[in-house]
Amino acid sequence: MLTKASVADGLGNPLELRDVAVADGLVVPLEQTDDTWPRVDLSGLVLAPGFVDIHTHSDLTLLSSPLAHSAVRQGVTTQVVGNCGLGMSPQSAVTSHDDLRGVNSYLDHDPTVDTHWQRLADELQAWRAARTSINVATLAAHIPLHAATAGLADQPADAGQVEAMAGLAHQAIDDGAVGLSTGLVYSPLCFALEDELLALGRVAADRGVVFAWHIRDYIDDLLPSLEQALRVARLTGCRLQISHLQVVGRRNWSAFGAAIAMIDEARVAGLDVAFDMYPYLAGNSMLTQVLPSWVQSGGDVGVRRALVRADSRARVRAELLSEPGMAFGWDEVLIASAPDPSVVGRTVDWIATDRGREPVDAALDLIAEHGTEVLMTAFGRSPEVLRGTLAHPACIVASDGQAIDPDGPTGHQQPHPRSYGCFPHFLAASFLDDLGLSLPEAIRRCTSAPADRVGLVDRGRIAAGLPADLVAFDPLLIADRASYTDPQVFPAGIERVWVSGQETVRGGEHLGTRAGAVLTRPATDRP
C-alpha cells in the first residue's frame, strides 16, 4: 500500500491526496485491502504513472545495459524504440548485416551486442531474453525496411520494391510493432520518393498504428518538409507523429509560427497529428548530417569513400562554405562520441585550431576517418521556439535519448544530457512556470498522452486493474543535474520507481530489479 502521496492519475486531473494499492503487478481497488497490508509512506511526494518515453534510440543499448540506469532513474518505466527510421529489423541479403549496422551507428555503443536476426519477432525475443528493468515497445523502422528491399544506394525504390516494403511493414506489425517510423534525413531514406512514404502511410492507416516522422529537414526546408508529412497523412488517413519538432538555425527561427499554423490547420481539418520535443536547446545526431544528401549514397562506406576522393571532397567542402552555409557555427558543434577520444567533448572549432585546420576541413577529416561513428551535439536553437513548442497543446515530451549505464559499455564518451534528465528537466517547477503549465498537465504529457499516441492504452495512468508502473518524486526538488559538459549525472528528486509493481529505484538508487516487459499491440487491436 502506497500511502499519503499526492496522486496524479496521468490524465491531467488535479492531484489528490490518497492511497494506492498494488498487488501482483497491478493497481487494485482499495476495498480489496485491509489493515494487514504493508504501508509505504510517500508523504510530501507526488505519485505519478511511470513516464512513457515514446521517442528513444535504446534499441541496442538495452541489450548491452538492460538495467537501463539513465532511463529508470529519471522515472521512465516504458521506452519506445525504432524511431527516426533507425533499426536493425528486418534483415535480408539485399543489404549485408555489417552495412545495415553501419547506417545505424547512432544506436550502436557496444560492438559485442549480437544483432544477427532476420525479423522483428527475433529482436523482440532478444529484449525478452535480456530481462530489462523497463518496458520496451518498438516501431517498425523505415531504414531496414528500405535496405531489405531496395538497398542503400542513391536510387528510388521501384514499384515492386515499394510493394515488398509494405509487406515487410505489415509483417513487423504482426510481430508486435506498435507503429512505423521514418527518418528522411538519414541514408538511404534521403533518397526515398513520396510513393514509398504513401505506401507506408497506407500500412499505418490500415493497421491503425502511428506513423512517426523525422521529417526531411528542420533547417531551411522545414516548411516543405512538414507539408510533405501532413500531405501523406491527409492522403492516407494515418495517425501522424512529428518527431522532435524544432527549428534549426537563427535564420529560420521565424518559420516557427508558420509551422505551428500548418499543424493547427491540419488538426482543425480532422487530421490526427501531434508532435514531441525534448526540453533542451541542442540536438544530437551523427556528424554526417552536416553533409549534403548526395554524398551519403551507400551509407557509411559510401560517405567515407566520397570524402577520401579529392573531387567529391572538394565539392562537399564548397557546398558547406557556400551561401547560406551552415545553419549553426562550428563553435556550436560539440563532438559527443568518436573512436578518437581526444576529440570527445571538444567543439569542431577547437579541434580545428588544435590541428591547424579550417573548421570545415577538421569536420570532414573526422567523417572521412570514422564515418557515422562520430556523433555531435549541435546547438543553433531558439529559447522562444522551444517554449512555444513545449507549451503547445499538441506537444508531448520525449527524450530522443538512450538508456545508458554510466559504468558499462554504453556509458563511454559524452552523450546528450537528455538521456539522464529529460523528464526531471521538464517537470522542474521553474521550468513549468516558464511554460505556463500546471503540474498535472505536465505529467499527462509525460504519461497518458504519449502512451495513447502509440496505442499503449494500459500505460501512463493510475487506475485499478492497470499495471503498476509508478514513480514517486519530490515536486520541490525534482531537477535535471546533467549538463552538456558533464552529462552522465542522475537527476534529483526521483525517490522511488516501480515497474510492474516491483520496486526498481529507491532513494534514487537502482535496486537491480529487472521487471520490464516487451509491450506489443493487444491482439484485440489487430485486424
Image (cartoon, rainbow, N blue to C red):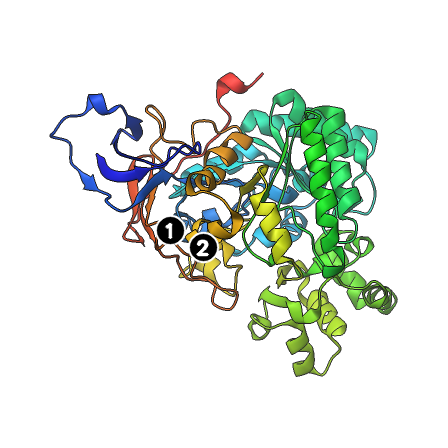
Give the residue at mark 2: 430
Marking on residue 522: none
Q: Could you tell me which secondary element the residue under label 2 belongs to?
A: helix
User: Cα distance, mark 2 to mark 1?
Assistant: 21 Å
Q: Can residue 87 be seen at all in this image of the molecule?
A: no
Decide if residue 258 is in sight here. yes
The image quarter containing residue 27 is top left
- Occupied quadrant, residue 356: bottom right
Query: At which x and y percent is residue 79?
Result: 48, 41
Asked whether the residues under the numbered discs 2 and 1 touch, taking CB atoms below 8 Å apart as contact, a structural biologist would say no
Residue in the picture at 39% in, 58% down: 490
Is 479 placed left or right of 190 in the picture? left
Quadrant where the image shows the N terminus: top left
- Residue count near mark 1 (Cα–Cα under 10 Å), binned few <14, some 14–19, many ≥20: many
List the residue tagged with mark 1.
Answer: 73
Give percent across and percent down for residue 110. 51, 56
Q: Position of residue 52 (x, y in %)?
A: 46, 39
- The residue mark sitting in front, 2 or 1, is 2
Q: Position of residue 148 (x, y in %)?
A: 70, 38
As drawn, is 29 to the left or to the right of 291?
A: left
Residue nearest the viewer, comparing 250 with 277: 250
| Corner quadrant of residue 464 | top left
N-terminal of the pair, mark 2 or mark 1, is 1
Residue sitting at x 21%, y 21%: 31
Give the quarter of the figure containing the C terminus. top right
Q: Give the amino acid type for the residue marked by disc 2 in the picture.
A: Ser
